[in-house]
Image (tube, coloured by chain):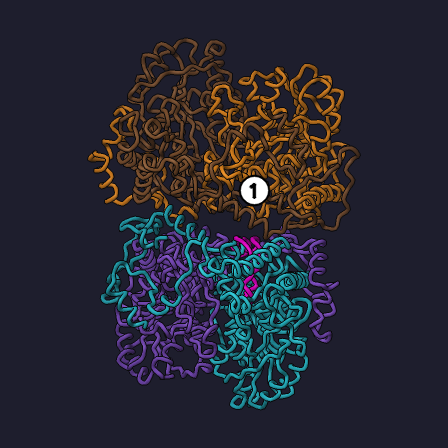
Chain colours: A brown, B orange, C purple, D cyan
């Protein structure tokens, strides 16, 4: 499909800006634009068509089944979009005085209350823009906490599981900590012996996803928490998999001191092709003083932003957080009420049903009941037919199903990580099983069908190596020389 | 009552439990130690039907003094620019709205091509070679730039102009301990940054970040500031107002290494501060140090053009603790709003947008009889000196239905009598006359 | 300035004129006699940019006292029912919104299947065999029913109950001269229609139309009315409230030949009276006499199921002056809103909707201390007798922020002291308490 | 694709209705529902997917080029959708007192002014729901006018062109008039001799589309008007083709007494797969008293609905008309202002460009410059290759282009009626020309490609005869007997 720039014609226009017939002051010499940006020039008709046609080349939850493990691709209620667009929310300026933003502040305060109850921890900041920023915030909180206790220099190590999301180690580095990894047992729990050997006075804390990225709840979580707390360290709960346990088990009760939520996973903020998200963080009372500034607080019937937080780590993003995301998540929670538990129960039931029906045709490295997701391995297909997890993933596309997460977690070879979520009906699950079984059969009977897949998408299989080797990261406007330079530089 | 988002019937549930080989839901949760199971109902407000939910949130929304209720001249980083209707048309299409990060490119050519187009327009606006797919907002991208500079130059000193948005400086300071950065701030001189003072501060620095226009609304001598940074061997980073780039020079044209900024003014609602998108673009040599997603062009099995997330070896899911950042989520949908808006404006529209803002500033300067706080040319914001504290002016003006702007004293010491008034293209001369009248009244 | 809806550049224009072989636009219009060419600019208001347009219409909208500003109990044919959010999600998809009538079925399977599904739900609700794809509104479908009856029975006499919506009766009377109809109206007895009186009027009639519930909110003895019509050899036609059909009997179940009604309450905004959709369903023997579009199932070349506009030999574009109507436009998008809403409610939700309306009527009857005008069971509207003219009650109540309902005296002689109050599921007991308080105040 | 009923499961739910905990009164005996309607039972996720998938099987202007002749498929500005949805418009009750609806009434009054100026006629009713209802309204106005003059019984005939839209003769019958047809000359004008022979004291009026459905402006329109006016008859302008002449030539100036507009054609109300539409009618002063009731009138600065219209024909639909359509059309007009003329000019330029580029490959029966549309004939393809207009239409689908109107007007064999509208860029026109030329070549080289077309749509060519012969007009719920009965009855 053509790029929008390839549909552009000099002099064509869509939008116009009011001029009010006023004289335009001169831009001071040397500061004025010398060359106009080559923005697209189209009339509105073709802009709408361009993006409509692009949308048609994209797959969302609204299109079909999207069992992308660890991403919790559930139905995004449409009423939430209408609510976030209400003028009283969408057109509210973030510098509006608190008395002119009471509705927004009340919503945020109520959201904090619900999040706190879900986590089993009393204090919540809504500021982080995403789960990954929540992680970083959590680690900064640890640093501030230990600094405040005079242990700042000593506590320099964070432990993560070998099954951890890549964000965990990256966040550890960005926050200026050392990383240490702990092994996973054959049953899919943290290896307690390994843990005991690694936790010591240098340990600042643990970062753990529970259930893990294997979709397994750590059966020894109580002991794990004890090990860290006994060493004076803190436990951080990566909320990426929170959808498994809402109303069933609370991170605070498990012993975690800091928790981040992914509002775009558990609480249905649409992910929009990569964002926005929201990554609030909840903490125990002892960590509350360090939360980012400002905080939403309630004084009687009045809500306000509290900027007077002397021990705060500071500000991790602008204003009080991604407010539009809060509106959607709050609305989502209010649609469920206490039945948020049924949400998680159903997610777990759906996952276990798929697991039960698929584990014979594919391998299940950790053969236990799962929580909200599970990880299969295609290694037998690879061994017997040369078919990889990637081939299976690409072939699923031909059946109008979004592939699961592949090659993650790293501890499982040829991993297929499957998370159906609670909003899928049994018919979709059955249809997915049928397709997965058919693909397993195709791997034996017609492996080239998988190797060459997809066949039914707008493009065939794409060359990712080529893209990385000679990066073309913007349109060239026919200016080959300039592009060449970039490619060279990028190499 | 359960929300209508769950699909299983009672019969489904029974059949599925049987297929799993368990007799109850409880059994599925046996792996959770009893000690950490919640043995009561969540203590959260009761469920609402959609009609009730709508009403509840309408009532909350009605408690906010938004742009439709109060004539507002608030700016200071977030602006009431017009968002064309087609933005929602595009963003609310389920294929864009309800998609995840495009890990599987064959399923996601729509969003991948859109990001590629976004990267192109950001490069065009900034005069840079490469843009990422967006950052969280216009402040966190400053921290991202510091991360690039630290690794590129090996220097930990960061120079920030005091004329930058205070929130940007706060965010960089929050990130600084983890990144191992040392922050130096350069005070303003009469509303803008003195290049010589900046040059002095830049010695030994890895990065210098300056704004254009600045937080006080004034035009900085940006080319001189960039040169001062370069001469010190630091990366020169301009934090620019995206709406100004039809009339103001592209940072790439005056030698910057990196250009960053807040995208909200192009295609996003104000939304009490988020979600929005931050942009980050750089010269090509920094491509492998850039945080965040980048989309690249490639070909498929048939040799046809297609797009993929590329240079992923920078990223956390492959490089883990050695990644250029921990970012997974960016702001794709919001930046798509930016792309649609820029396509709608085109080069002429973007220029008109800047011209109208400047024209309104000129009109306001004539009509409002308060002295300018700084004797500098402005782009779309005027800093005015008030005879009483700006906060009191705001309080009194709001009682008259007009929010006159931002009290600079909220952030900047010694500026309690400075009011920062923003003029987007949506503010009409008649509204400015009304503001002038109210200000005359409350300041007399 | 020209709206950004035109795509030709100056160069395009020149190239195209050249390809056509003319030298100017003027030449294209040479076929228009000079005497009838407009030699001046149109005298219409100046063009507005989108931002200005938005503001202008926001200002007009703000001059209306809509449901969000005033607590309203207005009904009398159009109701403030909740429209689920997914309705807009579906209706605003360009593929539905910007399509024409599906003349080319292979391009239009989406809308054709949706209409087929709509026809099915309307048949299910009404107990009929066949539904058209919708009519203009709930009143014009009554004229359509008369047209069917005239041609089926050969009789021109039309019997209308006085308890029907007055606007429905007005529309039928407007169409009557062209159709060659003669209208007889049957007065009510104590708020509903007496079957015996109806039987007497129905002698020699081709059609009898009665409401359920009726315009006064009362439940008619609909089965008896249908029987009276049938016994006279007339077609029995029920004009039903679509929101009642989860709790009230389907017209097909008590012998009606045709069921008609206004669909607005299911899935359409009030929108000051339109656009909405009217539904018309009938027993199968009338299928070839039905006006409007009908979608039918068929197969394609491969034997796969597909949908087409069918029975088009009824229609104007083939049958011309012998067509069953002149209709080309119907209300597809609005009826699609109905289909989506009915799918969202499901059978349980539709029943709950009716139950809640009835429950609120019961609650209101207890809380409001005004006598009922009629001693009859009601569905979702109560006719109350006011001690002062109902118009005065309305005026006084509106000053207190409450619109208490419709003054029946606007249409019905002798009912100046009757106020018709509507209770949709969106009205809460607390709001009814407020209404009761205001009515007590203004009626004392 | 499955019907929504085929995705239904008993007990599944999406929406819920508040109950407020109130007791539910009993429905009186004999009036209560005996069998629940078999409405679909799905959760919201699957409802959204169902309609998303249906939309993907539908083609709109937003999808691509839609040159459906006489239907004026132009770009529908999206801002108009937002404006019509403003709560002050969308949530306004039609029985709201006039003082509570001043904004709506002002908008309608302003719309009337603009429509009057465009038509060159002073009085406008907005009530009719569609062009076809506008036609009927116009004919009722004629009847009322002649009745008022005492000529009611005598004036019983309406004359239409043989090129007329089918609505014209159908409206004539519905309004209780006799129909008489007048021939078209070889140049595409009304045959004046034929006309003079047919116009007499029985003639109530003429119904004419100008430009005609051939896309040709009647060069003798002044003479035509004289003939009717001399006979005491009236002229009705069918506004279906008004998009050709806005700001260029006004029906009132041409001599027409009554004009209807199609707001969903000329003024961009999206047609929504068949509706809604709007069919306002403008008339000369002499006809004003007969316009439907109520009328929007202005008293100084106040607007009101005038119900006191003793000579009115009455009410043709509910309330004051399809108000949401008015909002969109008014916004459209205000976006153009006086440049509405450029809209029509561009529509005419686009059509003539296509005509110039296609007339060699296809036949052009009336070889003149056209207005906003033109009619080609595929009769040569039929004669030489057995390829019909329908085959060409179906083959266009494979190129993602919506076919033109075919087999209309009836005076042209194998007609292809092409209307590009003003919002198409030259590139789309050129692409259409390329495809049309390629199809003409295919007709010679590979006729089976056309005969079997379409190949690339969700369904292949559909059997319309079968559908009409054994009508299945609703889902059977597996109840074959009941369906059989309907089929029998329908036969």
Q: Point out the stretch of residues depicted in magenta.
A: D63-87
* Residue D365 located within the stretch drawn in magenta: no
The foreground one among D463 and B443 is D463
The foreground one among B341 and A42 is A42
Q: Secondary structure at mark 1?
A: helix
In-image side of B246 versus A56 (left or right)? right
* Residue D71 located within the stretch drawn in magenta: yes
Depicted D271 relative to depicted B326: above or below:
below
- Can residue A393 be seen here? The reply is yes
The residue sitting at 63% across, 36% down in the picture is B122
To which residue does mark 1 refer?
B337
The residue sitting at 47% across, 27% down in the picture is A132
Depicted B289 relative to depicted B389: above or below:
above
In-image side of B147 versus A439 (left or right)? right
- In x, y percent, where is residue D421? 60, 61
The foreground one among B206 and C363 is B206
- In x, y percent, where is residue B371? 75, 36
Using a 10 Å C-alpha cutoff, classify the residue at mark 1 as few (fewer than 14 neighbours), some (14 to 19) or many (20 or more).
many
Image quadrant where one finds the C terminus of chain B: top right
Q: Chain of mark 1?
A: B
- In x, y percent, where is residue D449? 47, 57
The residue sitting at 73% across, 21% down in the picture is B228
Image quadrant where one finds the N terminus of chain B: top left
């Amino acid at each position: 499909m053509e790029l929008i720039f390839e549909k552009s014609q000099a002099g064509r226009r869509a939008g116009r800006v009011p001029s009010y017939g006023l004289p335009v002051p001169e831009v001071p010499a040397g500061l004025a634009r010398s060359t106009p940006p080559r923005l697209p020039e189209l009339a509105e008709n073709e802009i709408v068509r361009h993006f409509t046609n692009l949308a048609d080349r994209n797959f969302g939850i609204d299109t079909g089944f999207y069992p992308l493990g660890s991403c919790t691709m559930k139905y995004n209620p449409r009423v939430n979009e209408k609510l976030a667009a209400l003028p009283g929310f969408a057109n509210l300026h973030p510098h509006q005085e608190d008395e002119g933003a009471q509705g927004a502040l009340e919503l945020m305060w109520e959201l904090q209350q619900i999040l706190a109850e879900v986590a089993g921890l009393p204090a919540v900041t809504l500021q982080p823009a995403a789960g990954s920023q929540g992680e970083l915030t959590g680690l900064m909180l640890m640093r501030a906490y230990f600094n405040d206790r005079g242990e700042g220099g000593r506590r320099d190590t964070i432990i993560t599981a070998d099954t951890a999301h890549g964000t965990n180690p990256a966040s550890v580095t960005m926050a200026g900590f050392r990383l240490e990894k702990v092994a996973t047992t054959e049953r899919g729990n943290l290896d307690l012996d390994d843990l005991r050997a690694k936790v010591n006075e240098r340990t600042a804390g643990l970062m753990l996803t529970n259930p893990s990225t294997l979709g397994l709840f750590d059966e020894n979580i109580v002991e794990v928490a004890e090990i860290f707390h006994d060493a004076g360290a803190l436990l951080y709960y990566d909320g990426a998999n929170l959808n498994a346990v809402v109303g069933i088990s609370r991170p605070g009760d498990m012993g975690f001191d800091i928790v981040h939520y992914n509002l775009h996973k558990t609480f249905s903020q649409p992910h929009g092709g990569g964002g926005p998200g929201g990554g609030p963080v909840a903490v125990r009372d002892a960590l509350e003083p360090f939360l980012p500034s400002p905080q939403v607080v309630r004084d009687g019937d009045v809500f306000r932003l509290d900027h007077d937080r002397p021990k705060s780590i500071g500000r991790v993003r602008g204003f009080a957080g991604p407010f539009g995301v809060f509106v959607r998540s709050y609305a989502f929670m209010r649609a469920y009420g206490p039945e948020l538990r049924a949400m998680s129960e159903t997610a777990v039931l759906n996952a276990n049903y798929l697991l039960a029906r698929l584990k014979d045709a594919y391998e299940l490295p950790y053969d236990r009941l799962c929580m909200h997701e599970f990880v299969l391995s295609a290694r037998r297909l690879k061994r017997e037919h040369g078919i990889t997890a990637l081939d299976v993933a690409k072939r699923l596309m031909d059946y109008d199903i979004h592939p699961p997460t592949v090659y993650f977690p790293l501890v499982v070879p040829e991993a297929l990580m499957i998370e159906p979520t609670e909003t899928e009906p049994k018919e979709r699950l059955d249809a997915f099983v049928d397709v997965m079984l058919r693909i397993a059969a195709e791997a034996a009977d017609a492996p080239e069908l998988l190797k060459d897949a997809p066949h039914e998408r707008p493009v065939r299989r794409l060359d990712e190596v080529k893209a990385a080797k000679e990066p073309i990261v913007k349109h060239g406007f026919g200016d080959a020389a300039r592009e060449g330079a970039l490619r060279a530089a990028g190499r | 009552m359960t929300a209508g988002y769950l699909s299983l019937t009672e019969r489904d549930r029974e059949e599925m439990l049987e297929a799993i080989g368990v007799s109850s839901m409880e059994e599925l949760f046996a792996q959770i130690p009893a000690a950490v199971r919640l043995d009561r109902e969540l203590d959260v407000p009761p469920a609402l039907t959609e009609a009730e939910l709508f009403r509840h949130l309408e009532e909350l929304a009605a408690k906010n003094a938004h742009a439709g209720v109060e004539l507002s001249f608030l700016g200071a980083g977030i602006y009431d620019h017009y968002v064309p209707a087609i933005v929602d048309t595009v963003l609310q299409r389920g294929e864009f709205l309800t998609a995840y990060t495009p890990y599987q490119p064959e399923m996601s050519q729509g969003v991948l091509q859109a990001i590629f187009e976004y990267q192109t327009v950001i490069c065009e606006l900034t005069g840079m070679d490469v843009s990422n797919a967006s950052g969280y907002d216009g402040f966190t991208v400053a921290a991202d730039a510091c991360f690039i500079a630290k690794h590129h130059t090996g220097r930990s000193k960061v120079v920030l102009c005091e004329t930058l948005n205070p929130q940007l400086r706060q965010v960089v300071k929050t990130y600084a301990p983890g990144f191992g950065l040392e922050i130096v701030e350069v005070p303003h001189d009469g509303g803008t940054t003195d290049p010589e003072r900046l040059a002095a501060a830049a010695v030994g620095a890895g990065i210098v970040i300056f704004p254009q226009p600045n937080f006080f609304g004034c035009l900085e001598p940006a080319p001189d500031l960039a040169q001062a940074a370069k001469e010190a061997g630091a990366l020169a980073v301009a934090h620019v107002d995206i709406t100004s780039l039809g009339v103001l020079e592209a940072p790439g044209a005056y030698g910057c290494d990196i250009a960053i900024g807040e995208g909200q003014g192009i295609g996003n609602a104000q939304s009490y501060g988020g979600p929005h998108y931050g942009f980050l673009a750089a010269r090509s040599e920094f491509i492998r140090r850039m945080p965040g997603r980048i989309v690249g062009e490639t070909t498929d099995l048939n040799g046809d053009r297609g797009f993929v997330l590329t240079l992923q070896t920078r990223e956390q899911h492959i490089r883990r603790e050695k990644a250029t950042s921990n970012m997974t989520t960016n702001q794709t949908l919001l930046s798509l709003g930016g792309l649609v808006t820029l396509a709608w404006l085109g080069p002429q529209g973007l220029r008109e947008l800047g011209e109208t803002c400047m024209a309104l500033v000129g009109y306001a300067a004539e009509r409002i009889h308060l002295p300018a706080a700084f004797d500098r040319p402005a782009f779309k914001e005027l800093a005015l000196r008030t005879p009483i504290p700006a906060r009191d002016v705001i309080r009194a003006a709001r009682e008259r239905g007009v929010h006159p702007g931002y009290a600079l004293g909220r952030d900047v010491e010694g500026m309690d009598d400075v009011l920062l008034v923003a003029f987007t293209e949506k503010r009409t001369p008649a509204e400015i006359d009304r503001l002038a009248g109210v200000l005359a009244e409350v300041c007399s």
